[in-house]
Amino acid sequence: MNEADSAIPVTDPFTLFEAWFAEAKEAEPNDPNAMALATATSRGQPSVRMVLLKGHGSQWGKGGGFVFYTNAESRKGKEIRANLQASLLFHWKSLRRQIRIEGSLEEVSGQQADSYFHSRPRVSQIGSAASDQSRALADRQHYLDRVTALEERYPEGDIPRPPHWTGFLLTPHTIEFWQDRDFRLHDRRQFTREGPGEAWSNTLLYP
């Protein structure tokens, strides 16, 4: 490739994300679907944490998107419901790439949340149902006792999904792809659109 050429093609950003994500799944030793999720309160106080991508592509919602699941009574869940805007960041160090995504959030349907919750290992279902995520915990044994109590209450089969355990779909208005280049002459291309279903425009960005 000519040094003057961009390594990031002009194409549909969901198609490009899928190609990069497929390479990450081959190259990353742990959790290639891990992403930083940044939310903010209604007053603009930001916070960020790692979550796992559990659905993505043009088939999600009206304009395509990225799905994750969480306890809606956790800090991030409360911030999401107070301010339905968020950012995602994928960083694949082994590939020297990252993708930044910004957009609006909406809750997935109860049926979608049920389907994913019950696709998880039984112990993960129990762990989520037993947790008051982000709230103060007097000691770890108290949490483990709640896990045990649920195991005894539901000795087999799926655990009922708690109503506050749900998923969110981020519908992007901006997706930026970043590729490391020698001497910090990095390659960046940003895709933007006015709304779901609208055509994407793109531009290169200075590194």
Image (spheres, grey):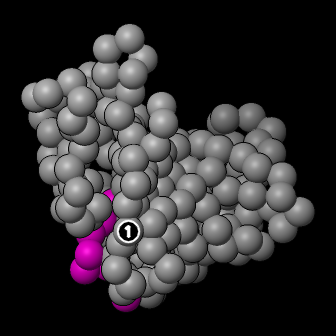
Secondary structure under the numbered disc 1 in the rendered image:
strand
Residue hosting label 1: 201
Q: Is residue 92 above or below residue 76?
A: above
- Left or right, 158 with respect to 207, comes to left
Q: How many marks?
A: 1
Q: Is residue 138 above or below residue 75?
A: above
Mark 1 closeness class: few <14, some 14–19, many ≥20 residues within 10 Å: some
Asked if residue 61 is among those painted magenta in the image, a careful observer would answer yes
- Left or right, 42 with respect to 185, comes to right
Q: In this view, does 16 lie above or below 192?
A: above
Q: Where is residue 113 in the image (x, y as percent from the top left)?
A: 41, 77
Q: Where is residue 18 in the image (x, y as percent from the top left)?
A: 20, 56
Is residue 98 visible in the rendered image? The answer is yes
Between 26 and 197, the one nearer to me in the picture: 197
Asked if residue 162 is among those painted magenta in the image, a careful observer would answer no
* Quadrant of residue 87 within the rendered picture: bottom right
Look at 62% across and 51% down and name the residue there: 38
Look at 76% across and 49% down and name the residue there: 46
- Left or right, 200 with respect to 42, comes to left
Is residue 118 visible in the rendered image? The answer is no
Identity of the residue furthest to the top in this view: 183
* Quadrant of residue 67 within the rendered picture: bottom left
Identity of the residue furthest to the right in this view: 43
Identity of the amino acid at label 1? Ser
Q: In which quarter of the image is the N terminus?
A: top left
Look at 35% across and 34% down and name the residue there: 187
Between 127 and 147, the one nearer to me in the picture: 127
* Quadrant of residue 60 within the rendered picture: bottom left
Residue span colored magenta = 54-62
Look at 80% across and 45% down and name the residue there: 136
Q: Position of residue 172 (x, y in %)?
A: 46, 69
